[in-house]
Image: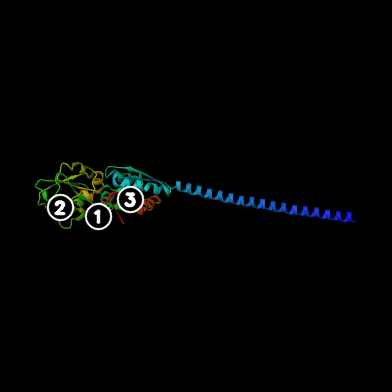
Amino acid sequence: MKKFIAGILTAALALSVLTACGSDTAAVTESVETEETAAEETGAEETEAVEETAEEETEAASKGTITVAASATPHAEILEQAKPILAEQGWELEVTVFDDYVQPNLVVESGDFDANYFQHIPYLESFNEEQGTHLVNAGGIHYEPFGIYPGTKSDLGALEKGDVIAVPNDTTNEARALLLLQDNGVITLKDGVGLEATVRDIEENPYEIEIQELEAAQVPRVIDEVAFVVLNGNYALEAGYNVVNDSIAYEQADSEAAQTYVNIIAVAEGNENNDGIVALVDVLKSDEIKEYINSTYEGGVIPFE
């Protein structure tokens, strides 16, 4: 009888052990399956994230190239600062420097370039009228105060009969130079000529000076040969001059001329709302670029609001 009871107890114990082992095995199996499922889900999420990132990078890289014709200083320098910002947005910016005021407009009109950055609105309007081009303003970026710089003389009060003052010869910039000379008592222009003034509009010339009209890029090159020169902001910078520190007199920031002659991004008519052009203008008007302009040119170039 005792042996019989012991056998029953042994069998029950064995069955209990087997049941416990079966429970542990099931738990382990369930745990492994859960971990595998979680790993698969995590892997899928990571794969999806990588694919989304790759898709975004591909989309950014596919936005394209923006080609811009520009004057060397300060325009091309400012554009160089815009390159990495545009690159982050997926745009490649290609800048080509021109040393005249004609070709940059012609290559945009022809479609060889997307935009140019070198001129102000009055010059653009005058060029369109004279050349039959169809260029428009896509956004104002900065203005450059005109200045009167010393040549062989350093004081306007020392002007004498026969002294020569060199000015740019293109329509709008010549008027701007003459207005600055008038503001500083050198000449007097006919009433109402304003931004269309030419040497023929000089009404009073008390010093009997000679106005030497030269292509804008040539004006700085005669500085040692004439009493004074009146320089565009970009050519003054290229010649190593700062309008605030080196000129005898310059346009004030709130003057009509300074506001009128804001330098712009110009494009062929109909392209002003293209994605690349909008992105370019937005970057050039950003706080980062404004800070660069202010710290680099110290008043020689002023961001346009």
Q: Earlier in the sequence, mark 1 or mark 2?
A: 2
User: What residue is disc 3 on?
Assistant: 292
The type of colouring in the image is: rainbow
> Looking at the picture, how far across and down is residue 3, in whole percent?
89, 54
Circle 2 or circle 3, nearest the eye: 3
* Amino acid type at image mark 1: Ala
- Image quarter (top left, top right, bottom left or bottom right) of the N terminus: bottom right
Give the CA distance from mark 2 to mark 3: 40 Å
Residue at left offset 86%, top offset 54%: 6
State if disc 2 and disc 1 touch (CB < 8 Å): no
Q: Residues within 10 Å of mark 1 (few under 14, many from 20)?
A: many
In the visual, does 91 lie left or right of 228? right
User: What residue is disc 2 on?
Assistant: 201
In the visual, does 152 lie left or right of 265? left
> Looking at the picture, how far across and down is residue 146, in whole percent?
22, 51
Q: Earlier in the sequence, mark 2 or mark 3?
A: 2
* Amino acid type at image mark 3: Tyr
Give the CA distance from mark 1 to mark 2: 21 Å
Q: Residues within 10 Å of mark 3 (few under 14, many from 20)?
A: some
State if disc 1 and disc 3 touch (CB < 8 Å): no
On the question of residue 296 being in view, the answer is yes
User: What residue is disc 1 on?
Assistant: 258
Q: Earlier in the sequence, mark 3 or mark 1?
A: 1
Q: Looking at this view, is 59 or 35 the one in front?
A: 35
State if disc 3 and disc 2 touch (CB < 8 Å): no
Give the CA distance from mark 3 to mark 1: 20 Å
